[in-house]
Every structure is written in C-alpha cells, then in structure tokens.
Image (cartoon, rainbow, N blue to C red):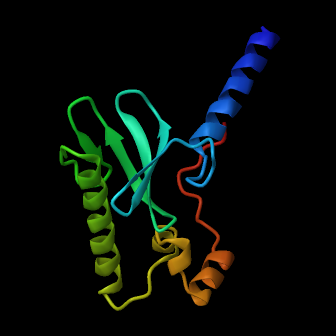
Amino acid sequence: MITTFSLQHTELEESLDKILLPPTDPNAEVQEISGYKLVYADGACPRNYRVYKADCMIGVIFQYITHWSNAVDKIRYPEQVDAAVGLDDFMKVARVSTTATGEPPTEEELFDKEFDALTSDEWERLRKYVPQAKHLVAA
C-alpha cells in the first residue's frame, strides 16, 4: 500500500510540473498564434491552454472536438485565435470597468492584474494585505 501511494505521489508531482511549465520552457507544448502563445496545461477533451500575451498570462481557453471556448464568455469559437481574442477583449473591458469607478481597486482586484501593470503603491498594498478567512472549517 505504501508503494502504491508513493507512486501516485510521484506521478502527481510530475503532472504538476508539466502543468506549470512557462511558455519559455523547452519542454512546454507551445502554439504561437497572432500575438498570443497557447501553452498546453492539461486535459484531453477539452484540452486546456493557458493564454499568454507579451509574456503575461491573460487566461485559459479550451479545445473541444468541434469548437474552442474560453473561461469568460461561453461562446463557441471556430478557431483558437478567436477564443484567445475574445478572452483578451473581455479582460480589457473588465480592467476598464473597474478603473472607471474612480475608486482604487481592492486587493482582490489587484490579484487579477498583470504583474507588470501593478504600480509600486499597489505592490505595497498587496505586501501588507492579509486576506480575511471566511467560512473556514477545521478538518
């Protein structure tokens, strides 16, 4: 029983390593399309790809047998580039809508921004931020 667990644990670590490969890793399965890099994460149907634009991850898209989709608009796209552009457009609109209120973004909203887009003040806010534990139950 211990041997089986250790094999499963090793397999889990290996699969996590593959999922977390950056697009610059020589072992990563990367597709470059029209300004985007798709990095295979996991799955068979759908296959899950992390979408990068200018070396920043913007989200995830999914490849089904008959179509592509992304994690935000639930539209069935015929091509992967269409799903990536739809995701990118949604993220741009989401950023504009949060900044249009004139109020500074919350710490939770800052976690959704690209690292390169954070100001030094925002980094400082995140450094001091302590999330509130809600609905935690001891196991």
Number of marks drawn: 0
Q: Which image quadrant is residue 124 in?
A: bottom right
Image coords of residue 52 (percent x, y): 45, 59
Residue shown at the point (44%, 81%) measured from the top left? 105
Image coords of residue 117 (percent x, y): 50, 80
Q: Which image quadrant is residue 95 in?
A: bottom left
* In this view, 88 is above or below 81: below
* In this view, 87 is above or below 13: below
Image coords of residue 40 (percent x, y): 47, 41
Judging depth in this view, the residue of 1 and 90 nearest the camera is 90
Residue furthest toward the top? Answer: 1
* In this view, 1 is above or below 42: above
Q: Quadrant of the C terminus?
A: top right
* In this view, 52 is above or below 106: above
Q: Quadrant of the N terminus?
A: top right
Left or right side of 10 for 98: left
Residue shown at the point (78%, 19%) measured from the top left? 6
Residue shown at the point (63%, 46%) measured from the top left? 26
Left or right side of 48 for 71: left
Residue shown at the point (22%, 48%) measured from the top left? 74
Image coords of residue 131 (percent x, y): 60, 66
